[in-house]
Image (spheres, helix red, strand yellow):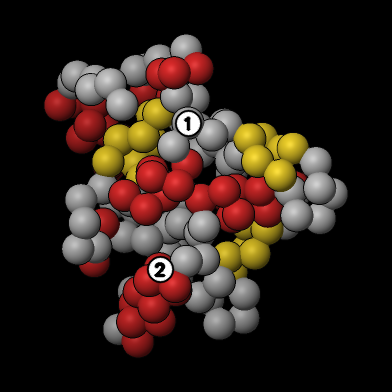
């Protein structure tokens, strides 16, 4: 993976824009044991830029699972679907919390494909959500 030199002011803006949450799995960076990263929505390997509209704040798990993917198979239609783009799409249009608020459900092909590709409901993330619920820190507000 090629290193990029994203300006510090861009990084700060991206963190503030995300309100400190992974823009995919919605986990807060304040409660993570791992550093979050600035992720290229369209990877540089697919000619994605270092511009703000192509950068997202992501936990290490989502960033690793996403890798250079921009599409994945929707489990319902069994067709390729684009992955969720936090710059051009609204999270609530594609995802919803289950009744326990520990599992993300896909409302659309994009949501379902993203859940599978990035493993948004991996066990450690669900455990973190349970702990955050217990202290009143989950789910994130929709503001």
Q: Residue at x 74, y 37 (%)?
A: 80
The reply to whether callout 2 and callout 1 are in contact (CB within 8 Å) is no
Q: Is residue 29 left or right of residue 62?
A: left
Task: Name, please, the residue furthest toward the left.
Answer: 8
Q: Nearer the viewer, residue 143 or 43?
A: 43
Give the CA distance from mark 2 to mark 1: 21 Å
Query: Please, is residue 78 above or below residue 6 in the view?
Result: below
Residue 108 at x, y percent in the picture: 74, 50
Q: Residue at x 62, y 81 (%)?
A: 99
Question: What residue does disc 2 label?
Answer: 125
Residue 137 at x, y percent in the picture: 34, 74
- The mark lying in front, picked from 2 and 1, is 1
Query: Please, is residue 39 above or below residue 10 in the view?
Result: below
Q: Which mark is residue 68?
A: 1
**How busy is the neighbourhood of tag 1: few (under 14 within 10 Å), some, or many (20 plus)?**
some
Q: Quadrant of the N terminus?
A: top left
Q: Which tag, 2 or 1, sits closer to the chain's start?
A: 1
Query: Please, is residue 118 above or below residue 8 in the view?
Result: below
Q: Residue at x 47, y 31 (%)?
A: 68
Classify mark 1: helix, strand or loop.
loop
């Amino acid at each position: 993976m090629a290193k990029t030199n994203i300006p510090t002011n861009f990084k700060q803006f991206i963190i503030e824009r995300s309100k400190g949450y992974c823009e995919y799995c919605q986990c807060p960076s304040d409660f993570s044991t791992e550093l979050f990263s600035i992720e290229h929505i369209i990877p540089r390997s697919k000619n994605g830029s270092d511009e703000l509209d192509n950068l997202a704040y992501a936990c290490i798990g989502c960033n690793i699972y996403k890798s250079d993917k921009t599409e994945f198979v929707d489990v319902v239609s069994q067709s390729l679907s684009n992955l969720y783009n936090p710059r051009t799409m609204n999270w609530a249009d594609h995802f919803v919390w289950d009744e326990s608020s520990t599992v993300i459900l896909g409302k659309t092909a994009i949501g379902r494909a993203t859940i599978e590709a990035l493993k948004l409901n991996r066990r450690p993330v669900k455990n973190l959500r349970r702990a955050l619920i217990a202290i009143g820190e989950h789910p994130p507000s929709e503001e």
